[in-house]
Image (cartoon, grey):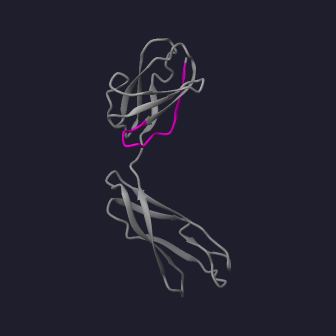
Amino acid sequence: MRSLNGFNSPVSLAAINLPPGYSAASWNPPSVTPSGNGQASATLTINTTTGTSTGSFTTTIRASAGGYTTKDIPVTVAVQQAGPTVLQISPSAPSKRAGNQAVTVYGSSSQPGLNVTVVFPNGARDTLSGSGQIQNVSGNAFTMIVNFNNNGGQYSIVVNNPNGVASRPFSFQAQ
């Protein structure tokens, strides 16, 4: 928020008109005081639930200060589908031996039809996909079939759901 004409009073912030499925909105800090002709900022956090719809919606940011007209500002917020997460794998340090190995990936929001990008210790990449390499997909786990070809070291994987949403990289050691 930017001060005009030397304004330097406390301003209370609120988010109103949240659509159904949004559990709460909060500001940090909930009130700001800009210096005269200066600026102040706060962060708005909108909490969602599993019932929250994706897409764009308009909510209203309300700024109020004693003795001044309350200002309502419409803001468009885009909510995207949560991406898959990888929390752990089993075994946690797969064997580097040659031959196909089943590695179970645990996390959330995995979708049937996903693929996995594997980054090898030397920086090379490969994509695992299809029922021969990705098996037993549920929302919180799946099995990937990997051949480490006697190459130990630091690997990372990225889970790519068919809707285009990807996980953050998850790193592990093959020993």
In magenta, the rendered stretch is 160-174
**Quadrant the N terminus occupies:** bottom right
Residue 30's spot in the image, x, y percent? 53, 69
- At 37% from the left and 34% from the top, the residue drawn is 114
User: Height in image: 21 above or below 70?
Assistant: above
User: Height in image: 76 above or below 149?
Assistant: below
Q: Quadrant of residue 86?
A: top left
Main SS, magenta residues: loop
- At 42% from the left and 15% from the top, the residue drawn is 100
Residue 104's spot in the image, x, y percent? 40, 25
Residue 39's spot in the image, x, y percent? 64, 72
Residue 67's spot in the image, x, y percent? 54, 88
User: Height in image: 138 above or below 59?
Assistant: above
- Residue 173: say if magenta: yes
Q: Name the side, left or right, on which 30 lies relative to 127.
A: right
Residue furthest bottom as drawn = 67
Number of marks in the image? Answer: 0
Which residue occupies the foreground of this view, 169 or 36? 169
- At 42% from the left and 17% from the top, the residue drawn is 101
**Quadrant the C terminus occupies:** top right
- Residue 26: say if magenta: no
Q: Name the side, left or right, on which 122 lies relative to 103.
A: right
- At 37% from the left and 43% from the top, the residue drawn is 163
Which residue occupies the foreground of this view, 15 or 30? 15
